Image (cartoon, grey):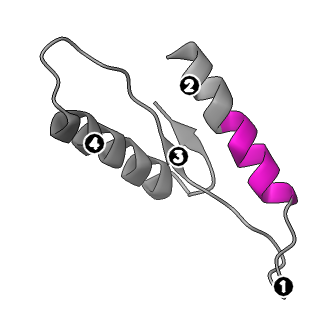
Amino acid sequence: MEDAVKLAEELHQRLMQLKIGEADNVTGSFGVVEYQEGDTLDSIMKRADAMMYRAKNDGRNCVRY
């Protein structure tokens, strides 16, 4: 989990440095989860999606885990 959060934070920082066309800035909201015993691909994706929406609801442009 720690490595995944670090990667998401790094991607987040790199996105903010991008200049694309007329866009003043590029941002991203990330949700990170880890495998739990009994997980399916669907359950992992649902939890990751929930964390992404939490990031968006917390003001966007951040990582939640």
Provide the secondary structure element on which disc 1 rests.
loop
The disc label shown at residue 21, or none: 1
Among numbered discs 4 and 2, the one appearing first in the sequence: 2
Residues in magenta?
9-17
For mark 3, what is the residue?
30
Q: Can you say whether 32 is above or below 60 in the image?
A: above
Question: Which of the two discs, 3 and 2, sits closer to the camera?
Answer: 2
Among numbered discs 4 and 1, the one appearing first in the sequence: 1
Depth check: give the residue in front, 56 or 22. 22
Mark 1 vs mark 3, CA separation in Å: 23 Å
The disc label shown at residue 45, or none: 4
Question: Which of the two discs, 1 and 3, sits closer to the camera?
Answer: 1
Mark 4 vs mark 2, CA separation in Å: 15 Å
Assess disc 4: are there few (<14), some (14-19) or many (≥20) residues with their C-alpha within 10 Å of its C-alpha: some
Among numbered discs 3 and 2, the one appearing first in the sequence: 2
Q: Main secondary structure of the magenta part?
A: helix
Assess disc 3: are there few (<14), some (14-19) or many (≥20) residues with their C-alpha within 10 Å of its C-alpha: many
The disc label shown at residue 4, or none: 2
Q: Can you say whether 13 is above or below 18 in the image?
A: above
Q: Is residue 62 magenta?
A: no
Q: Is residue 11 magenta?
A: yes
The residue shown at (18%, 11%) is: 37
The residue shown at (38%, 53%) is: 53
Mark 2 vs mark 1, CA separation in Å: 30 Å
The residue shown at (56%, 25%) is: 4
Provide the secondary structure element on which disc 2 rests.
helix
Provide the secondary structure element on which disc 3 rests.
strand
